[in-house]
Amino acid sequence: MKLVEIARIVNGSIYGKGNFEIVNILPPEDAKRSDLTFLFDSTFKTQAGAIIAKRKYKGKSGVVVKDPKEAMYNLLRKIANSKRKGEISKKALIGKNIVLPKSCIVEPYAIIKDNVKIGRGTYVGAYCYIDKGVIIGKNCEIYPNTTIYQNTKISDFVVVDSNTVIGKEGFGFLKLKRYERIKHIGGVIIDDFVEIGANCAIDRGTIGNTMIGKGTKLDNLVHIAHNVKIGKNCIIMGQVGIAGSVRVGNNVTLCGQVGISDHLEIGDNVIVYAKSAVFKSISKNKKYSGIPAREHSAVLKAIARFYKNAD
């Protein structure tokens, strides 16, 4: 790809050699003279021959843009979106009364049970298991070895990465002479533009549904327990665990290894920092950290006093 083509994609102003041929797109520390890189920090030095940044660099060719991160998003999206050709493998096991448009891709050894409905342009990877009656919308990507149990409804443009399990029974027991499992007859509802990383577990509701709101993104190794309801545009990072019946608002950020106890409410625009343990509900627009989690400003003050006294 030539630099002039990239400038059109990212809507930037080109300088230097417009016919510069890009061999690779690499991080600034790895890029060589034939490569393109992005610079978010103007002080960083790179051997890249072409640069996308907010300003020009002497002796280089490049593209000047208002926001290099947005330019990266647009360019990588364009490169990655080479459309797969619709094909349903003869080696897939397809049940009865299925809605499966020809534009879908179903790879070998996927199992799709009876009464499943899948929207146009959706990809189902090898060895996926989609249980009876599951509904999956259009232009979704379900990567290999994913398991989706019954009573699950997935909307449009959803991405589910490999080895994730959606709709399994929750961790609910009644202690009699021994622990007896409480049957879970609810489901899971996942809204548009949700992305779920690899090796996640999303339990179905005991009664009612576990819900994930539009545009929310889950990292790898996230556990969402039964009847949790997560709002729109949340970011949930790796190894977060959310216990049963928690309500999470919109635009919430849960950093890595956060744990949230059951039946709590987390308000809109809350940030909970890494490794925190939340045992009480949090009102909107707050920042929390620590074990047990407290307002982040109070935690910082306490740490400052601790180290001052230690000296």
Image (tube, rainbow, N blue to C red):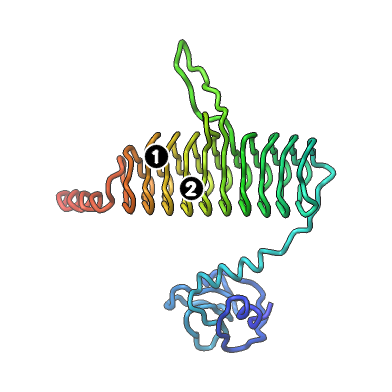
Is 149 displayed left or right of 69 in the figure?
right
**What residue is pinned by disc 2?**
238
Given the current orientation, which residue lies at the most extreme top position? Answer: 177
Q: Earlier in the sequence, mark 1 or mark 2?
A: 2
Figure check: 311 above or below 181? below
| Local SS, label 2 | loop
**What residue is pinned by disc 1?**
260
Callout 2 crowding tier (Cα within 10 Å): few <14, some 14–19, many ≥20: many
Q: Residue at x 31, y 45 (%)?
A: 290
**Residue 76: quarter of image:** bottom right
* Amino acid at dot 2: Gly
| Local SS, label 1 | strand
Front-most of residues 111 and 291: 111
Q: Residue at x 70, y 38 (%)?
A: 129
In this view, the mark in front (1 or 2): 1
Given the current orientation, which residue lies at the most extreme right position? Answer: 90
**Residue 17: quarter of image:** bottom right
* Amino acid at dot 1: Ile
Q: Quadrant of the N terminus?
A: bottom right
Image coordinates of residue 7 in percent, x first then y, are 60, 80
Image coordinates of residue 107 in percent, x first then y, are 77, 47
Image coordinates of residue 66 in percent, x first then y, are 48, 78
Is 307 displayed left or right of 129 in the figure?
left
Image coordinates of residue 191 in percent, x first then y, are 56, 48
Front-most of residues 305 and 125: 125
Q: Residue at x 81, y 48 (%)?
A: 88
Callout 1 crowding tier (Cα within 10 Å): few <14, some 14–19, many ≥20: many
